[in-house]
Image (tube, rainbow, N blue to C red):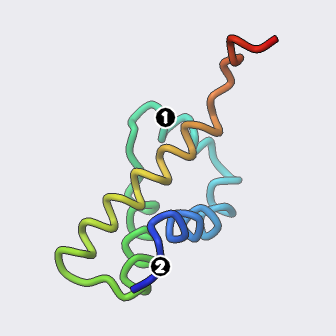
């Protein structure tokens, strides 16, 4: 298994792009700091399709979910950066 967690997270975001475009997913993810059940199902399927099983599957699902959540939170961050010239 050479697929990285980052690559799997990218696949999840791509797979959910259509569904997310129809709803305000970012607000829900940012407020709860977790994916909804449908998003989690997609994460689990993509990780399983990559060949992960058993304990490795569970660990990778958590890691990929955390990466997706972190990316959504970062993209939703509209706070101005400080310290720039």
Residue 48 rendering spot, x and y as whole percentages: 36, 82
Which residue is more in the foreground, 65 or 17?
Answer: 65
The percent coordinates of residue 70 (x first, y second) are 49, 43
Q: Residues within 10 Å of mark 2 (few under 14, many from 20)?
A: few
In what element is the residue under mark 2? loop
Q: Residue furthest right?
A: 85
Image quadrant containing the C terminus: top right
**Relative to residue 84, is residue 30 drawn left or right?**
left
The residue that mark 1 highlights is 30
Residue at the spot x=43%, y=68% of the render?
43
Relative to residue 7, is residue 30 depicted above or below?
Answer: above
Question: Where is 81 relative to 17, above or below?
Answer: above
**Horizontal side of residue 33 vs 72, given as left or right:** left
Residue at (47%, 79%) from the top-left corner? 3
Q: Is residue 30 left or right of residue 26?
A: left
Considering only order in the chain, which callout, 2 or 1, is on the residue closer to the N terminus? 2
Tag in front: 1 or 2: 2
Q: How many numbered marks are there?
A: 2
Looking at the image, do the residues carrying marks 1 and 2 touch, with CB atoms under 8 Å apart?
A: no
Q: Check disc 2 and report the residue beneath it.
A: 3
Please tell me whether mark 1 sits on a helix, a strand or a loop: helix
Which residue, as the protein is rendered here, is positioned at the far front?
A: 85
Give percent across and percent down for residue 14.
64, 67
In the picture as drawn, the residue positioned furthest to the left comes out as 55
Residue 39: x percent and y percent?
Answer: 46, 60
At x 50%, y 53%, the residue is 68
Question: Image point 41% across, 78% down: which residue?
Answer: 45
């Amino acid at each position: 298994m050479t697929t990285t967690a980052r690559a799997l997270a990218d696949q999840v975001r791509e797979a959910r792009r259509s569904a997310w475009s129809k709803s305000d997913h970012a607000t829900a993810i940012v407020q709860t700091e977790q994916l909804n059940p449908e998003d989690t199902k997609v994460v689990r399927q993509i990780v399983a399709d990559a060949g992960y099983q058993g304990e490795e599957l569970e660990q990778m699902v958590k890691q990929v979910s955390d990466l997706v959540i972190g990316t959504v939170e970062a993209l939703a961050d509209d706070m101005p950066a400080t310290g720039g010239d």
